Image (cartoon, rainbow, N blue to C red):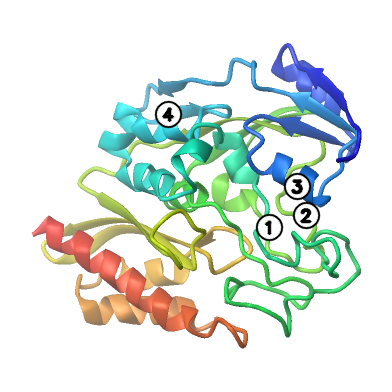
Amino acid sequence: MMPFDYRRAPDPEAAVAAATGSAEVAFLAGGTNLVDHLKLGVAAPGVLVDITRLPLDTVDALPDGGLRIGATVRNADLAAHPAVRRDYPVLARALLSGASGQIRNLATTGGNLLQRTRCVYFRDPSTPCNKREPGTGCSAIGGYTRHHAILGASAHCVATHPSDMAVAMAALDAQVAVLGAAGRRVVPLVGLHRSPGDEPHRDTVLAPGDLITSVDLPPPPPGARSVYRKVRDRASFAFALVSVAAVLRVEGGVVRDVRIALGGVAHRPWRARRAEDVLVGARADDEVFRRAVDAELAGAAPLGGNRFKVPLTRELVVSALRGLSREER
């Protein structure tokens, strides 16, 4: 492991001041992703700023009926929170489907959003990877691609984002509060993560030193039901081959409100806007569900080893919507 300096931030402003403008500084919270990268030689920050004692570890009700989740709230605590279980079951299920219980006890909300891809080439410093070392090439293209993207990829990177929690938050229209050198700002969660383009080493729109302080969930849509479903290679903890977070409100057999986000298919949590456009105002039945998913997947570009993700995504989304619409009857 490379040597590094360690500092403990007394407050969020000091944490930002310690990290602003330097790509050599990393925030340390749960460490479940960062420590892995230090061991593998994927990351070698010169300074670690410990943010574990910042007052960002609470879940609070908002006046509008929504919920504010502090950036250092542990994934296990968030999944078990009564308000999350009652009002946002899609989020509770997503959290519980991610990692092992031991990891969820350490992993934090902010860190989960910022975790990096599990692409095997990214995690192997002996192979070229544009995300780890810009300009070296993408070993996955023409290589092992079972877990890689079918939507929104580029000629420079076909990696996928690994978070389950972020997929659920994308479907919930979450808002991310960020503290940076210029002050505080709010970023829609669906705008936080980037498509790879020609800069796949940039996972998000955050600048060096930007600190996620909290995530706001709007009030749950009245009458809506939600679910998170995940397909993986084994029943114990594993990253998603494909996952779906769906929020659906059906009245009189017609879709009145729907939000769909996909995981395991793109460089970022993929909000399925095309599918949502087909569904709103249409009958809630399998024919329409399939037409909606096919509209979303029309732009899919699978690779040699992950063509199965197209039909898998179709069936997973249809199954999720079918289940939610049946609960309405």
Eye-nearest disc, 1 or 4? 4
Which mark is first along the chain, 3 or 1? 3
Three-letter amino acid code at disc 4?
Answer: Asp
Residue 301 picture quarter: bottom right
**Residue at numbered disc 4:** 77
The residue nearer to you, when weighing 200 against 121, is: 121
Alpha carbon distance from label 2 to label 1: 7 Å
Left or right relative to 148: residue 319? left
Mark 1 and mark 3 residues within 8 Å of each other at the beta carbon:
no
**In the orientation shown, which residue stands out farthest toward the left?**
329
Which mark is first along the chain, 4 or 2? 4
**Residue at numbered disc 1:** 194
Q: Which residue is drawn at 82% across and 59% down?
A: 132
Say the numbered circle drawn on residue 37: 3
Q: In this view, does 25 lie above or below 12?
A: below
Eye-nearest disc, 3 or 2? 3
Three-letter amino acid code at disc 3?
Answer: His
Q: In the structure shown, which secondary structural element does the residue marked by tag 2 occupy? A: loop
